[in-house]
Image (cartoon, rainbow, N blue to C red):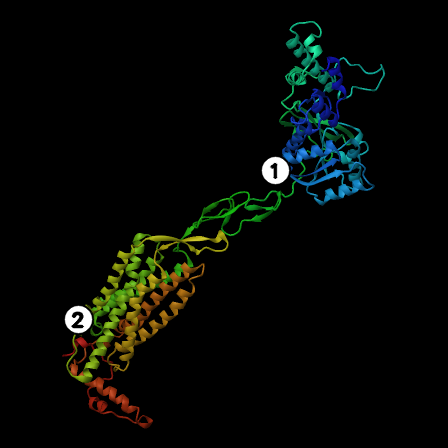
Amino acid sequence: MFTACHISAWVWVWQRIELTSFLSLSFQIPQISYASTAPELSDNTRYDFFSRVVPPDSYQAQAMMDIVTAMEWNYVSTLASEGNYGESGVEAFVQISRETGGVCIAQSLKIPREPKPGEFDKIIRRLLETSNARAIIMFANEDDIRRVLDAAKRNNQTGHFLWVGSDSWGSKISPVVGQERVAEGAITILPKRASVDGLEKVGRDSSYEQEGKVQFVMDAVYAMAHALHHMHRKLCHGYPGLCPRMANSIDGKELLGHIRAVNFNGSAGTPVVFNENGDAPGRYDIFQYQITNGSTAEYRVIGSWTNKLNLKVEAMRWKTGDPSLPASVCSLPCRAGERKKVVKGVPCCWHCERCEGYHYQASEFMCELCPYEMRPDANRTGCVAIPIIKLEWNSPWAVVPVFLSMLGIIATSFVIVTFVRYNDTPIVRASGREMSYVLLTGIFLCYAITFLMIAAPDVGVCSLRRIFLGLGMCFSYAALLTKTNRIHRIFEQGKKSVTAPRFISPASQLVITFSLISVQLLGVFLWFAVDPPHTVVDYGEQRTQDPRAARGVLKCDISDLSLICSLGYSILLMVTCTVYAIKTRGVPETFNEAKPIGFTMYTTCIIWLAFIPIFFGTSQSAERMYIQTTTLTISLSLSASVSLGMLYMPKVYIILFHPEQNVPKRKRSFKAIVTAATMSGKLSQKGGDRPNGEVKTELCESMETNTSSKTTYVSYSNHAI
């Protein structure tokens, strides 16, 4: 039971948490406070009969957090005076930082109730241990604020710390007197208040003004009055004065319900309302302590907070007029192409690591590998397609092979034209016209393949490469093998019988040659059936460590193994031909084809033996495409040039410059040819057994009258067989 006069007194005196708890739990007496801001008083389970017309410090902590966030500070320290106000305010701020994220607490320091000498200097030194955390969130009393600023000044830290003060600092002058420079830029908050009209100064000439809490005292009294008025209308039904119902028994819970339901404009013109916890709305003015005109220091309103922040950043000043925002961050933002590697346990601190190789910055914290056909862009914030290249005609790697090929084609064409022009002369006929044209066709194809190897790859070019890559060599060495085999068979047969061997006529030689060539063509067509030709872009060939130099190579889908298989048959013909050339090395000089073929094959083998290590030894090189293509085309051109130079250039020289030697000679029978060759072999053996070279063979004696001092060109097709 209590009366209205009792209630009005409780508004003024109940300010301590212990007394509030006692009245709530023991007597269930409603209370309205005009100054208590402790966050724990919002606990409706313990202080359910408590209300207040000032906002709790939890709102103040939220406002300070919003200021820190707006300033883009993510690394701050807190400083609190020991006691309920300071510790609960910092605890509320830390709790909000954990819930919202984005702001890390570097240090949480406490100022003892009875600090020892040097305690504030120690606090400053500890704050400097995390020097990047320049912003200091302060929930401290006036005296502690003053001594902290003094210690900062004493330790030459003027301008280093960015102070953010609670309403205990507000717009008070006493904490900053004599310490204006070290306090410059401090941001403070204060519950929104206004002077109440009608209250005059004490005395006509008095310097005293209204205390800041007058507004809240009046609002608390009026809140209780409005609650009692509403309860009177409800319980007394127009009865003047106290009706028996209100005079005899008033339920505290019933009165609390009327208190929580009040809604009126207070003395400052702002609404007075309570939420379910009995808290008033959070309304704050935000100040900054600024020094203007070089010496004038004052608090200036730079914003407000009413459930959300309204901050005028352009009105803020730092370091005597500097408008730029200072930083209070643990780590600077990473540059483009760098990821954050967060320090364990401190999410606002990180190390910046550059995305290396073919990785790009996929997110703030991750680097990811670009797709295989792509590389990082210049900033490493995305991927771009790797440029595609091919062997260009103006490349030095192409100019030399093309030049050699053109010379070879011109020379081969000249030989062919000469042979056609002098087709019926003895030298052309002695060379075996049909086989010579086959061999010259192969030489021409060896030169021509250079253009296909350098041309831009497409399905057509790739198809032609497969067909003609080994075909030119196959034409050449199939013809040469047929020739050397024919010579070998003729003289082997001559040792046994005077009967000519089979299949030595021109028609037979052509059939044998084209049979050998058909094997190559059959292999190529099978290759077409198993693996149709197509182009690929090889991104691995020039995938360098530096992605900027990476290139994709447009090429025909011909592996090294396929290339060797394509050339393998021709190389087999070449080796076999070389074996026959060795076997026929003892043929008399009058049989003019054998030894030039031998020299041709020896030289060709050397060329291709040099080709193999160069071709396969550069398989890991970034210039692989250029080196291998150039090596292959030059090897083909050199092989063709050796055949052309050793087998046909001497004949062309005689045809054009010594026509007197290009005359028909006496035909001899096959028996005479074989006999001469056999006797020549025996002569060579006997000559080796006689000292000092004293030898005169029967063959020479018997043939002295028949031999001419001039070279005789023998065509096997002209002998009587």
Q: Is residue 258 above or below residue 134?
A: above
Query: Which residue occupies 49% across, 52% down?
Result: 547
Q: Is residue 553 left or right of residue 656?
A: right
- Graded by Cα atoms within 10 Å as few (under 14), some (14 to 19) or many (20 or more), the crowding at tag 2 reads few
Q: Amino acid at mark 2?
A: Ser
Q: Is residue 358 left or right of residue 87?
A: left
Mark 2–mark 1 contact, CB under 8 Å? Answer: no
Q: Inspect this view and state whether residue 272 appears.
A: no
Question: In front: 529, or 451?
Answer: 529
Q: Position of residue 174 (x, y in %)?
A: 80, 29
Q: Secondary structure at mark 2?
A: helix
- Residue labelled with disc 1: 102
Residue 522: quarter of image: bottom left
Q: Secondary structure at mark 1?
A: loop
Residue 625: quarter of image: bottom left
Query: Which residue occupies 46% across, 53% down?
Result: 550
Indicate which disc residue 508 carries.
Answer: 2
Q: Amino acid at mark 1?
A: Gly
Tell me the quarter of the image containing the C terminus: bottom left
Instruction: Report the mark closest to the observer, 2 or 1.
Output: 1
Tell me the quarter of the image containing the N terminus: top right
Q: CA distance from mark 2 to mark 1?
A: 92 Å
Q: Position of residue 626 (x, y in %)?
A: 41, 59
Q: Is residue 257 above or below residue 696?
A: above
Query: Which residue occupies 65% across, 41% down?
Result: 329
Q: Is residue 449 left or right of residue 207?
A: left
Q: Which of marks 1 and 2 precedes in the sequence?
A: 1
Question: In front: 455, or 17?
Answer: 17
Residue 81: quarter of image: top right
Q: Is residue 325 above or below residue 721?
A: above
